[in-house]
Image: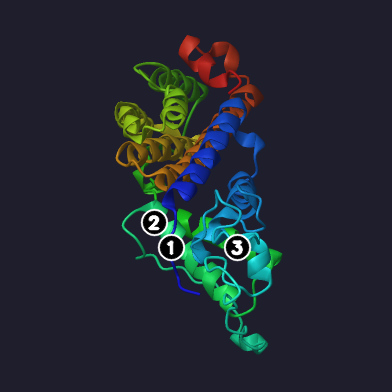
Amino acid sequence: MKFLHFKRSLIYAALAVIILVGVYLFARKPSAVPDNTLATHTAQALLLETDTDNDGLKDWQETLWNTDFHNPDTDGDGTRDGVEVRENRDPTKKGPDDVLPAPKAEVPADDKYEYSFDKSAGSSFTDLLVINLLSNYAQAKGNGALNGTTQEEMISNLLRDARGTVTLDTYSSENLSVTPFATASTYINYYNKLGIVVTTKQTGVGDEIQILAEVIQTDNYTGMVRLAPIAAVYKRTAENILNLPVPSALSSAHLALANSYYAVSQTLANMAATDDPTAMLVNLGYYREAYDSMTSAFGSLRVYALTNDLDSRLNEYGKAIVATH
């Protein structure tokens, strides 16, 4: 069987649904979905289980056989494509002369399929994922190693490695201005100033969820350019947080907060600069994690203020930090 041209629109549609579900669940409760669970299981359901024409071949398997996933009997010989494949017949050629060569003999365990990922494949994130997906599937099938477990591991590994193609910059403790000896007034001043940083000049912050939803609903990925100015606001906020003197006892939470704003800015900027849905998927995963980290950092700052009875002495900006996030 030849390694045939794939129907890219199928993969694009599947990825769009993954992204839409992710946006919807994030908008409801970002931390409710464990890391990688949503993407992995949704991808498996969409890419492995969809059989549009109910012929016994999954849609993306049909791309390998060069059959029509809208036609259950591509060659019109009266037998469904999936049945022909199981009977070792060519689903694109009418019988009776459609028998395929005998399958390879069982290979030793050491020579079985081994997952691989080519970072240079394709010219876009989606091409990267699709080409590696089909390449691994063809190799596993050809070696007689294709089963449910192999498929699940394959998709999980692909999502992991596609994600690994995006890296985000981070700040380190060396970038902080730490106040080693702090009094109560130092802490109060810190909370009040941090409150000003994260509550003022935040134009567009939070609108990214609606923009992402609209982009997917209209299937117009060029609309992601609207994320650029919001990314700039997050970046400016990250820099302002970083430049704020911080008591040493709060330095870890402070650094985590700065990095979470910085990560959000980078993911939004990345999405604004591309119209590729897989790139959007990968960056959206980082975006959700960054917001989870942001929530955790605010939580740590809140606990410290309440534990040390600082909340009653803070102004309105400082109280905004102590409020539940």
Quarter of the image with the C terminus is top right
Return the mark for residue 196. none
Tell which tag, 2 or 3, sits nearer the viewer: 3
| Among numbered discs 2 and 3, the one appearing first in the sequence | 3
Q: Mark 1 = which residue?
A: 131
Q: Are marks 3 and 1 in contact (CB under 8 Å)?
A: no
Q: Position of residue 279 (x, y in %)?
A: 40, 47
In this orientation, which residue lies closer to the viewer: 228 or 233?
228
Is residue 23 visible in the rendered image? The answer is yes
Q: What is the C-alpha distance between the residues marked 2 and 3? A: 34 Å
Q: Is residue 201 left or right of residue 161?
A: left
Would you place residue 11 above or below residue 96 in this image? above
Q: Are marks 1 and 2 in contact (CB under 8 Å)?
A: yes
* SS under mark 3: loop
Return the mark for residue 127. 2
| Among numbered discs 3 and 1, the one appearing first in the sequence | 3
Is residue 252 visible in the rendered image? The answer is no
Q: What is the C-alpha distance between the residues marked 1 and 2? A: 6 Å
* SS under mark 2: helix
- Amino acid carrying label 1: it is Ile
Would you place residue 58 above or below residue 204 in this image? below
Residue 266: name its quadrant.
top left
* SS under mark 1: helix
Q: Position of residue 112 (x, y in %)?
A: 61, 82
Report the residue at 55% width, 12% height from top. Answer: 313
Q: Is residue 286 left or right of residue 270?
A: right
Q: Position of residue 267 (x, y in %)?
A: 39, 40
Q: Mark 3 = which residue?
A: 77
- Amino acid carrying label 2: it is Asp
- Amino acid carrying label 3: it is Asp
Report the residue at 58% width, 64% height from top. Answer: 154
Report the residue at 68% width, 73% height from top. Answer: 87
